[in-house]
Amino acid sequence: MGIGEILFYIFVFPGFIFLLCWTFFIFYFSRKALAYVHKRVGPHFNGPAGSLQTVYDVFKLLVKESVTPKSADPYLFNIIPIIAPLVAALPVFLIPWSPLVNNGHGIIDTNYGVLGLVVLIGVEPFLLFLTGFGSNNKYSLLGGMRILSQMLSMESPFFLASLSPAVLFGTMNLYEIMESNTWLTTLILLPGAIIYIIAMLGILEQPPFNIPDAEQEIVYGFYTEYSGTNYILLKFAGFTEILVVSASAVVLFFGGYRGLGFESFWWLFIKIVLIAIMVVAIRASNPRLRLDQMLKFTWSWLTPMAILNLVWVTFARIYILGA
């Protein structure tokens, strides 16, 4: 792999420019979709169907002053918004995005891709906890503590569900899992996919699990003291994580960039958008759970179901696939 190819991967696709385009797209898409479901207008003045409103909002935030509170730890407060997007973007290089990129493999082709994804995705909530801790604000700290509680709870079913394709196909290589997927294995993995997506909502702090930034209870959680560029960097990290976790769900359970008749990045993108539509629909129609309700649901139902799913996948590997 030459230096030019490496730079292309880092800065163009699946690197910085691709992630920036995704951020603009998902921000605009979620606004319009929520407006449609809630019978609201949504952005419509600037650009075709309001498509430039998101661009203006981003530039508005970029020119706003980033204020560091006197009581905050200045180093921790200002360095985490820089580190968070970088850490959120690392799993991008493990995912097989297109048959044209690195012969269909991830940029980093490893036999431990599933483990790498779970570990890197699990690091991000710790960084968000540090944003609350470094803010030295009671609301931010409460939001950070909620992130840790939610992450420690949701990581168990998330990890167990992500293991189900590895158990079924006998490999942790994401490319091999994607290539081994068929309509039959997709049906076998469907319970694991449902568990994965539910846990995914908790990992991403998406409704009904948007407990760490519950503005009605704790102002805006760990975001409370952030403004300007620091705020937009944290949101960029959040949108990048949405892309990474959604893409990993597609690769693990739904065949990645493989589709009817041909293989293409657009199949992967269509599947990711379908997951995004489902997430927006859940956001629009469900109230937020309390922290105790989330903990009870995760440990009493979701984690035991994830364990039973591994038993089912093991049974299917031996008696259905005959492996």
Image (cartoon, rainbow, N blue to C red):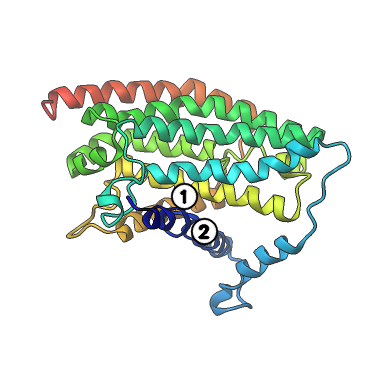
The one nearer the camera, 101 or 43, is: 101
Q: Is residue 255 above or below residue 148?
A: below
Task: Identify the element where label 2 is drawn.
Answer: helix
Place of residue 149 in the rendered image (x, y in percent of width and height, measured from the top left):
61, 26
Expressed as whole percent of the image width and height from the top left, the position of residue 67 reads 82, 50
Kindly tell me whether residue 287 is visible in this rendering: no
Residue 56 x/y as whole percent:
66, 70
Label 2 Cα crowd, 10 Å radius (few <14 / some 14-19 / many 20+):
some
Which labelled disc corresponds to residue 26?
A: 2
Task: Pinpoint residue 39: horizontal percent, then vertical percent.
Answer: 58, 65
Could you tell me if the residues under marks 2 and 1 are in contact, i.e. CB atoms within 8 Å? yes
Q: Residue at x 28, y 20 (%)?
A: 311
Viewer-side residue, 104 vs 27: 104
Q: Which mark is residue 121?
A: none
Does residue 176 sit above or below 276 in this rendering?
Answer: above
Amino acid beneath label 2? Ile
Residue type at numbered disc 1: Leu
Q: Quadrant of residue 218?
A: top right
Q: Residue at x 28, y 32 (%)?
A: 165
Whole-angstrom CA distance, mark 2 to mark 1, is 9 Å
In the visual, does 297 lie left or right of 321? right
- Residue at 50% over, 62% down: 21
**Nearest to N terminus: mark 2 or mark 1:** 2
Q: Which residue is mark 1?
A: 243
Say if residue 193 shows up in the picture: yes
Question: How many other residues sit within 10 Å of disc 1, few (<14), some (14-19) or many (≥20)?
Answer: many
Report the residue at 50% width, 46% height from top.
Answer: 89
Q: In which quadrant is the C terminus drawn?
A: top left
Q: Secondary structure at mark 1?
A: helix
Q: Looking at this view, name the residue that lies furthest to the left.
A: 322
